[in-house]
Image (cartoon, rainbow, N blue to C red):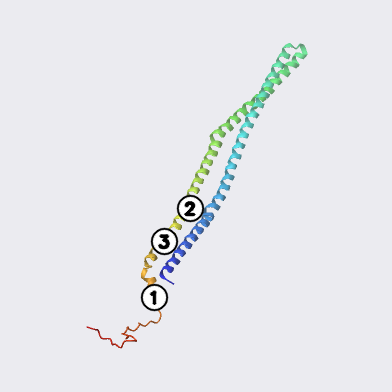
């Protein structure tokens, strides 16, 4: 083989090594970035949905408390209306029926007070739940979502760093291959191929003998010069 062929072989080896590095880099991107990113994406989406479900449950509990309070208010209003009805009956009743109507009126007032107490307690409970919802539950939920998204950014930065490091390593190895090739090319001196050609094509050789004077066949003469 000639020096040029050897250099050409180095060129091909460099190209193959570079291609192998690209293939390796692609595999590393899949193993160290694509697959982990896929897993992280699914995990974070699941956690995000849990936050959404929890937020919806809190909102439902809040709305249920408001609805229950509204129902209790309705019972209180109905009880007050019944007290008013009993009062009118007591005022319009006579003799024995008047005493009976008065007792029913007093009993209805007591019942109304019980309903009122329940209504007031429900107001306090609802307000306390409202306070916790807006000042504790929702802020905690938002803080948790903030932590989730900030941690996602941390993981994303780590993956980007890994990607840059992998590419940097691949480029360094490619540079090493190119630098080796650049060192080999100047070694391919033009004279080397010539020397190789001569060495592989040398054959036995003898210098031809000197030419001598040959007299004419029709004239007898010698090799002396005529003056």
Q: Is residue 163 above or below residue 178?
A: above
- Viewer-nearest of labels 1 and 3? 1
Q: Quadrant of the C terminus?
A: bottom left
Q: Of marks 1 and 3, which one's residue comes earlier in the chain? A: 3
Residue at coordinates 46% horizontally, 64% vertically from top-left?
12
Is label 1 or label 2 in front?
1
Tag of residue 106: none
Q: Which label number is shown at residue 163?
A: 2
Helix, strand or loop for disc 3: helix
> Could you tell me how far apart the alpha carbons at marks 2 and 3 are, in whole angstroms?
22 Å
Residue receiving disc 1: 198
Q: Left or right of 179: which side holds 85? A: right
Quarter where residue 213 is shown: bottom left
Instruction: Please identify the quarter of the rendering in which residue 175 is found.
Output: bottom left
Locate residue 189, reporting x and y percent: 36, 68
State if disc 3 and disc 1 touch (CB < 8 Å). no
Q: Residue at x 53, y 38 (%)?
A: 142
Residue 92: horizontal and vertical position, in percent?
A: 74, 11
Q: Return the disc, 2 or 3, that comes first in the chain's sequence.
A: 2
Which label's residue is closer to the chain start, 1 or 2?
A: 2
Give the residue displayed 52% in from the left and 52% down from the top: 33
| Circle 3 crowding by C-alpha within 10 Å: few under 14, some 14–19, many from 20 | some
The kind of secondary structure element at disc 1 is helix
Q: Residues within 10 Å of mark 2 (few under 14, many from 20)?
A: some
The label shown at residue 178 is 3
Mark 1–mark 2 contact, CB under 8 Å?
no
Q: Is residue 133 left or right of residue 68?
A: left
């Amino acid at each position: 083989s000639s020096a040029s062929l050897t250099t050409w072989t180095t060129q091909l080896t460099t190209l193959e090594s570079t291609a192998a590095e690209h293939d390796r880099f692609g595999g590393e991107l899949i193993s160290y970035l694509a697959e982990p990113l896929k897993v992280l994406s699914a995990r974070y989406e699941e956690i995000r949905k849990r936050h959404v479900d929890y937020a919806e449950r809190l909102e439902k509990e809040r709305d249920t408390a408001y609805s229950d309070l509204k129902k209790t208010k309705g019972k209180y209003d109905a009880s007050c209306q019944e007290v008013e009805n009993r009062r009118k009956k007591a005022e319009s009743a006579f003799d024995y029926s008047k005493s009976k109507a008065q007792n029913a009126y007093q009993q209805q007032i007591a019942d109304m007070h019980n309903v009122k107490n329940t209504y007031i307690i429900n107001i306090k409970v609802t307000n306390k739940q409202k306070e916790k919802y807006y000042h504790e539950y929702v802020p905690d939920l938002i803080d948790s979502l903030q932590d989730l998204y900030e941690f996602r950014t941390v993981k994303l930065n780590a993956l980007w760093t890994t990607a840059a490091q992998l590419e940097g390593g691949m480029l360094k190895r490619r540079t090493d291959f190119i630098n080796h090739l650049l060192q080999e090319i100047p070694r391919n001196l033009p004279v080397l191929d010539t020397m190789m050609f001569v060495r592989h094509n040398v054959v036995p050789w003898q210098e031809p003998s000197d030419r001598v004077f040959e007299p004419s066949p029709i004239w007898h003469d010698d090799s002396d010069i005529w003056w």
